[in-house]
Image (tube, rainbow, N blue to C red):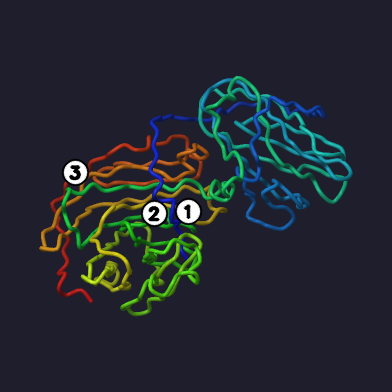
Amino acid sequence: MALLRYKGIRQYIYTIMICAVGTLPSFGRDAIHRVSTKIDTLTTVPIGGNAWRTDNDTAGGNISENGIVHWSNPNAAYTAYFRLGSTGKFKLYLNMQVRAGKSKITITALGLTRRVSAPAGSFHDVYVGEWNAVDTGYVAVKIKGESKTDSLFADIRNLKLQGTAINAKTTFVKNNEGEFFYWGRRGPSVHLGYTAADGVSAEWFYNEVTVPKGNDVIGSYFMADGFGEGYFGMQVNSPGERHILFSIWSPFNTDDPNAIPDNQKIVMLKKGNNVHTGEFGNEGAGGQSYLNYMWHAGQTYKFLVHAKPDGKGRTEYTAYFFAPELNKWQLIASFSRPKTDTYLKHLHSFLENFEPEQGTKTREVLFNNQWICDRNGNWTELTKARFTGDNTAVKGYRMDYAGGLEGNHFFLKNCGFFNYYTPRNIYFNRPASGKKPAVDLSKLP
């Protein structure tokens, strides 16, 4: 079970733009509107990649690639998002059909509520109303069933937008090419690439990670020690399960671990107590290990990775984890990677959400006191990092991402449709701590 797409962390394409955004607390009389004429000039926002059911239930209606379907539950509520890059007015339509009977639906955005009434018929654009956006940023469109005369409210494929506020700066997940509905619902992944001096053969990479309280959202991977051939960090897998995860990719390019030739498989050399090991696929493939450990938000954890070529065309990678609750370093696992002769390179950290249904929730992580140690035992502090994002961020499909410097820490933040973002491909420098890792490398388990 690999929870980072192999290609995702290598997409370092960048842009520059910052926006500060708010919402419009406007109010008005409810209205009932309907139009059956197709309007070709509307901007289409697919429900499938830009909306979530938000009433903590799954019965009687859900979001599919085709939008809202099987909607029978009167308590079901949905929220769709798009981001305005310009102020002004916009008209909103629902592309929908009522299969039988007649349905009335309530739509709320920017504090203004409208109602639409539609009889049975084929898919058509139903006019909802007009809004005035006095600021840029995300608009949440809340959709709720009010009444129906048959078993289902409606099928809704798209929102459609038109007006002075709608232009090329209006952003949303535009299509499902390359599984973008899936990746768009997950939200943008963000990275910090650490700058090390040229010519340093780094055997060790040390990092400290703190998840602020309230940010340990299910589906989060707070990756501390990333390098060219693997990654090491901590996850929130469910309400009662959290992992310390360490994985190494095979040099054989595949998503199927069963397709890897024997001479290119990752070999597990050793593992710590209670550590699970195996193979992973679907996001590259290789060897994986994880420790079930209920780490706590607000607490700082330490991660240490070692890499050393064996002189025979393989490199051995070993991961160690320090939890203050246990007050000792623990071995996670050691893997041997074939066709590899390298020390640690391309050092980075990242933050991702791996559960699409959690894409509406914001999470943040702090990284501090990064160090490397060369093969001669010399420690060097890393204080410079470059902020980047994955393809969801690069395409501008989701703009709810941020990263940089927070106090003396680097930070990463994503998801939840917050109304600002950090320019990608810019560098940040944290103050040097001078606190060399308090670890005796010769006594590690």
Question: What's the residue type where badge 1 is placed?
Answer: Asn
Nearer the observer: mark 3 or 1; the answer is 1
Indicate left or right for 93 with 241 as reference. Answer: right
Identified by mark 3, the residue type is: Pro
**Is residue 287 in view?**
yes
Structural crowding at the residue carrying mark 1, measured as other residues with C-alpha within 10 Å and reported as few (<14), some (14–19) or many (≥20)? many
Coordinates of residue 8 in the picture (x, y in percent)? 44, 51
The reply to whether dot 2 and dot 1 touch (C-beta < 8 Å) is: no
Q: Which residue is mark 2?
A: 213
Query: Residue 139: percent from the left, percent from the top?
Result: 57, 34
Mark 3 residue crowding within 10 angstroms, few (<14) / some (14–19) / many (20+): some
Label whose residue precedes the other's in the sequence (3 or 1): 1
For marks 3 and 2 on the same chain, the one whose residue lies earlier in the sequence:
2
Quadrant including the C terminus: bottom left
Residue 305, picture quadrant: bottom left
Residue placed under numbered mark 1 in the picture: 353
The residue depicted at 34 percent of the width and 62 percent of the height is 232
